[in-house]
Amino acid sequence: MLSHCKSTGILILLLLISSFSQGQTKKNGSIQIVGDMRVSMLVDKHIEMNQRLRTIPGFRIQVASLSGNDSKNRAFALRDKIQEAYPNTQIYVVFDEPVFKVKVGDFRTRLEAYAFLNKMKAVFPGTIIKDNVYALPLTLDETIPDEDF
């Protein structure tokens, strides 16, 4: 009998707690999330940086890595030679101490970079796709409209 009274008392207590919490939800109608403000600040900073950068990840082909005497002049001469062979391609000369690297293209995928690499290998042997991902400029035709779908 005592066991029955305990279980009934616990059941009544649970029902009271349940009805109290439901009353609170109906009364307020809102949810409040309590958390560390630093997390919110970091998320806001991340969003701000992404809006400012306007870049997307991509790949570039490294044609040469030159060091030593006259490496700067050789790198820019190679850039001119590549520009002559592929006039509509972006070419970059990057100084990564102590070498000058000549890189080609703004490719969105590794597959695009590999297709261009196969064209270049005949004229410029030794070219490779760098595993590093670069931030490529985002063009207007690649942006998604802000319309609701």
Image (cartoon, rainbow, N blue to C red):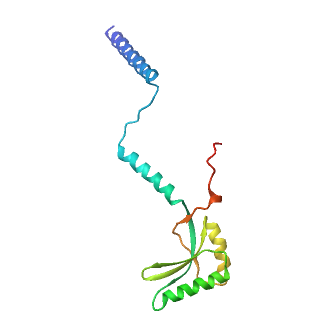
Q: Is residue 118 above or below residue 33?
A: below
Q: Position of residue 138 (x, y in %)?
A: 58, 61
Q: Is residue 13 left or right of residue 88?
A: left
Observer-nearest of 18 and 137: 137
Residue at the far top in the pictured view: 1
Q: Is residue 104 above or below residue 11?
A: below
Residue 132 shows in this picture: yes
Q: Is residue 63 left or right of residue 14?
A: right
Q: Position of residue 98 (x, y in %)?
A: 42, 83
Badge count:
0
Give the residue displayed 62% in from the left and 82% down from the top.
82
Give the residue displayed 41% in from the left and 16% down from the top.
15
Residue at the far bottom in the pictured view: 69
Q: Quadrant of residue 54?
A: bottom right
Observer-nearest of 7 and 85: 85
Q: Position of residue 131 (x, y in %)?
A: 53, 70
Give the residue displayed 46% in from the left and 92% down from the top.
69
Observer-nearest of 109 and 27: 27
Observer-nearest of 122 and 105: 105
Question: Looking at the figure, which quarter contains the C terminus?
Answer: top right
Q: Is residue 1 left or right of residue 145?
A: left
